[in-house]
Amino acid sequence: MLTLPASAATRYPLRYAVVDVETTGLHAPGDRVLQIAVTQMESDGTLGQVWSTLVDPGRDPGPVHVHGITRERLAGAPRFDAVVGHLARLLDGRVLVAHNAAFDWKFLAAEAHRAVHRLPVSQRLCTLALSRRLDLPTASLSLAALAAHWGVAQARPHDAEDDTRVLTEILRHSLAAADALAVDLPLSACDPAATDPVYPARLPRPVCPWAWPGRWTQGRRLIQGAKVAITGSTATARDALAARATEAGLDVMNTVSGRTGLLVTNDATATTSKLRAAAMYAVPVVSEATFASLLADVEPGTPKPEAARPRADVPSQRAAAPAGPLAGRCLLVLGGTHAEAAEVRNRIADLGGIAAVNLTARVNGVVALPGADNDRRWATVTALALPVRTPDALEPPAAAPGAAAVEPPAAVPAVVLSRGAVIDLPDDVEDWTVAVSWPAGAGAEVDVVAFLTDQDEQVRADADFVFYNQPAAADGSVELTLDVPHEALVDVRLGRIPKDVTRIVLAAAITGTHTFGDLGPVEFVARAGDGATHARATLDAATTERSLLLATVYRRDGRWRLRAIGQGYDHGLAGLATLHGVAVDDD
């Protein structure tokens, strides 16, 4: 058992509750918890209470081949409402820690709501996010891979009690590594709204063929193309009600924006996020009965015009460079102006190395430019005794025959892409996660977005714009997760991409008056569904620009390909959306 250094407790004065749940499925609103395990850990690494229990879900246990929890094992197990009080006491005042913490929190919050009990949790820490921030050189980010990396033995994988024991040790090692690197923990808020009434998952949202007719006003007919949303319980099943609206030519939304025509609810006093947004945007709110009468007489709309626009100016396509003299090395550039540092980072990529965005466990060298010792990370670099070189000594010296290398390269199971480079994605992998990160402490807010476009890089409809207020495509093919600071995740499920979508464009935009020159480099890492790193790129071609095209995943000759872009624009998010054919609100 690792002993945490005293500095870790000082840097992270937190109390933890390490949690794992086994469930009947993957969808918190409909599936149920089967097993819960909790281990309390103090800031110095000492353990408190350890507790686990099976939970009677009141239904079939689901994939027994995964979790091994049969009906026979569940015989006599308590229901969740019988254990939620004790669970709440174990969690009270602690940071909830889990591997994919959003998943565990959603299930626990949903079960707590059914039991009419709120859990006293305000923050969570995901060990997946922490491992990404540390940039550990592991084959994947699975619990088994991290356990192997830290030398923690697994006895019963997918058993909540054993998984929690393993995760507690992984947390100790991760906190020690984070402390040595002076890394901020990727803490996420546990929004109390997550325990609000649980309703069905996001509704399917077919592309509406009718142009948006403007805001609807009470007393008038609805026009085809009007955007509507539904919240709360309905007498008619929500998916059936949405299908009726779609058949009438309306655009059924999963969120409320300034373009939403009306919001349907049978309880206008509820506190759902859609009702809060409707109040902010002054969206009319109608009952289900009123909506049904409006559906009976919808005015014909105007078909959407065919969009045609030249493709954005992007670097010419070229294959990823073969491994170079810096292959296996990860270098952090400190000091200099943004332009000077960007030039060095581009050289590192051209030589096959990784240009780090932050100080991580993978960094095995530093390139120092003038003023490097003024960087807040310099003291940590010195304490770690990392090799420091100058730009004119970027390439490692050739080792004499039989001599050991000066800097042993770290294992890098990924292709390093420079600006404009292209690689084919494996045919047997459909699910991808692209993690986009940027320097901590830069003081600029970044919006990461995705566009599902045709070959002219134009969206088919506004629904193909995935951003913070619409974080998933209607068909679930692309989904955005904004869970921790300085990072955004874009999940791309290639098997669900509609046939008329030829590419997914990933981009970032700076809010306020900042530019990418203020922010510094942006990195993206493409990982397969199992967390295995496949490709990565560090991009800071933009300087005075406020938006940046990062990458595109596109079809070519029956295959999916990934290209690093790095093209900047002076406009912000609204201009970026307009460039790709999104109709942007004027109000």
Image (cartoon, rainbow, N blue to C red):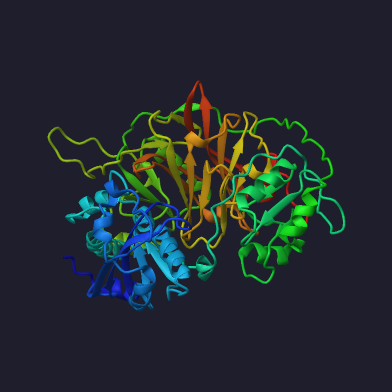
Q: Of all residues shown, which one is farthest toward the right?
A: 219
What percent of the width, then of the height, locates residue 160? 27, 60
In this rendering, position of residue 545 left or right of residue 442:
right
Residue 137 in sight in this render: no
Q: How many marks?
A: 0
Q: Quadrant of residue 312?
A: top right
In this rendering, position of residue 393 left or right of residue 205:
left
Above or below, comparing residue 52 to residue 62 in the picture: below
- In the rendered image, which quarter contains the C terminus? bottom right
What percent of the width, then of the height, locates residue 414? 35, 38
Q: Quadrant of residue 300?
A: top right
Q: Of all residues shown, which one is farthest toward the top?
A: 557
- In this rendered view, identify the residue nearer to me: 390 or 77: 77
What percent of the width, then of the height, locates residue 318? 48, 26
Q: Of all residues shown, which one is farthest toward the left?
A: 402
Residue 500 in sight in this render: yes
In this rendering, position of residue 112 left or right of residue 234:
left
Q: Residue at point 69% right, 30% down?
A: 310
- In this rendered view, identify the residue nearer to me: 70 or 96: 70
Above or below, comparing residue 136 to residue 392 in the picture: below
What percent of the width, then of the height, locates residue 81? 39, 72
- In the rendered image, which quarter contains the N terminus? bottom left
Q: Residue at point 65% right, 44% down?
A: 463
